[in-house]
Image: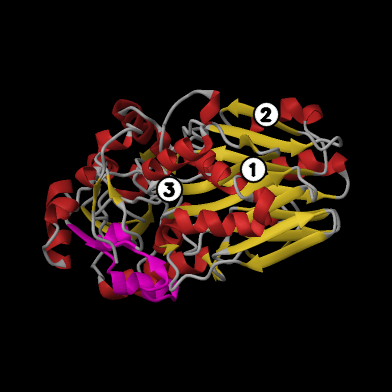
Amino acid sequence: MEPFIWDRCGVVAARVWDGGRLFDYIYEGLCAVQHRGQESVGVSFLSEGQDIRTLKLKGLVSQLINHRGDISGFAGIGHNRYSTRGRADGEEFIQPVEVSVGGERLSLAFNGDVANFNELRELVRKEMDVEVRTDAELLAYLLARKLNVAGVFGGYEELASLVKGAYSAVVLYSGEEPGVVAFRDPYGFKPLALGYNEDGFFVSSESVAFSDCYMRAEFVREVRPGEVVAIGPSGMHSKQVVSARRHAHCMFEYVYFARPDSVFEGRSVYDVRERLGRVLGESFPVDADIVIPVPDSGRSAATGFSLATGIPVKEGFQKDRYLYRRSFILDRHKDRQDAVRKKLNPLGVVVTGKRVVVVDDSIVRGASVRRYISDLKRVGAKEIHVRISCPPLLDRCPYGIDFYREELIARKYLGLSHDEICNKVAEELGADSLKYNTIDNLTSAIGMNENELCLGCLTCKYVHDIPVESKRDKKSLGATLQRTNGL
């Protein structure tokens, strides 16, 4: 995976019957979704006196160990941050965020992005006389403003009618029925899963959090798009509050973001990635000696490509396991380049004199692909054929992945045929050949049609009528936004 994509966050929630176990479940759940954000970690919890308390730290989940004695109670939510809007270092930008409206107090953490943020920020500022700095604060205020009148189900219905964007959220609520609330946007862009064991109920961005390696809970099901799940003293209650005309599950969860041992919309992420490699090999075979994956997200697809073509898989790169931070989260170009250089070291003993197929999940700017092609040539690879399990990225994502259209290597070839784009990118990067998967192959491997997936970054067509933001505009919350046509 090219390491320059800013994405997402990971959320967890727990409603336990024994308050002494709360820290363990929140901690283990956040460890399971650490890959979704490594800038900061935050936890909100309900003390025995039903007061919400929040702890925020910069860096990785492991820091929470030093605060084990500070976190207790019967309900809590946690968040691993990877910033999209308002990339900043202040504690106020770390989730969860607490708000209080009309005597109602809640804390909210979410995964996603609000595309009409500026518009709704002005609405909240005028109606509620508060300043809103982040998407999380915006969602919290929109939910809180209706709690007294309509409860959590009615509050979500109002929120969903206003927000254009992606959001899978967990909420800690200290009202008459104190506990945890979880909800997804009506289109279901981002994953959100439910778990259960004898100690309580749990929510996580990914089902892997419930495995024996982490929370040791049963994966019950996923929160449905447009559904609200409330977990309080009397157990779990849910309601399908909003139903959309279609769904728009993020295809990039299958291609890259989710862990391969997770399930998203009833589909094993590992199985989908292996199928992506199979159809890639069936559609674009090549005479070669070995297949090597770009670790780690390229491994499943490389296995599928090998099974389809009969070319053996070898480990051609040694990954530095101690560079834990995903290099795509680094801010400066030089830092990202240094991380790429240090992260993958080619194994000359494997590739020297060989015709090599390199299988990767996607290409954004092309910088890291260019780098590993150069490195493989330097250590003696005879030919280098690149196979990419994702189709060409052609447009920005308004739903939480911060790559910009002007930075996409394939964007400059928009309007050319699929084969022409492949050939142009191969020439630009110095590969002997390069083939992307097609959109048809992608949807076939996932097992969903185009009306069930969000493919906006591939097709330039979106579910919502969304703002168009340049790279510079996105860094300014006060930018004047133009509009683009949606579906």
Give the colour scheme of this rendering: secondary structure
Query: Which of the two discs, 2 and 1, sits closer to the camera?
Result: 2
User: Is disc 3 surrounded by few (<14), some (14 to 19) or many (20+) residues within 10 Å?
Assistant: many
Which residue ends up furthest to the top in the rendered image? 90
Residue at position x 67%, y 29% from top?
55
Check disc 2 and give the amino acid type.
Answer: Leu
**45 and 203: which one is in front?**
45
Say which residue appears at 46% left-offset and 54% top-offset: 162
Reading the chain from its start, which is encountered first: label 3 or label 1?
1
Mark 3: which secondary structure?
strand
| Residue 358 in picture, x, y percent from top left | 31, 55
Question: Residue 438, how many percent across, how many down?
Answer: 27, 69
Q: Is residue 439 left or right of residue 212?
A: left
What segment carries the magenta color?
Answer: 433-462
The picture quadrant where one finds residue 264 is bottom right
User: Cα distance, mark 3 to mark 1?
Assistant: 23 Å
- Residue beneath disc 3: 114
Q: Residue at x 72, y 59 (%)?
A: 195
**Is 79 rendered above or below residue 214?**
above
Which of pointers 3 and 2 indicates the residue nearer the eye?
Answer: 3
Query: Residue 328 at x, y = what percent?
Result: 39, 39
Given residues 254 and 77, the one toward you in this image is 77
Residue pointed to by mark 2: 55
Residue situated in front as seen by the camera: 347 or 365: 365
In three-dimensional space, the C-alpha distance between marks 3 and 2, rounded to whole angstroms, equals 24 Å
Secondary structure type for disc 2? strand
Dot 1 amino acid type: Leu
Whether label 3 touches label 1, CB < 8 Å: no
Mark drawn on residue 30: 1
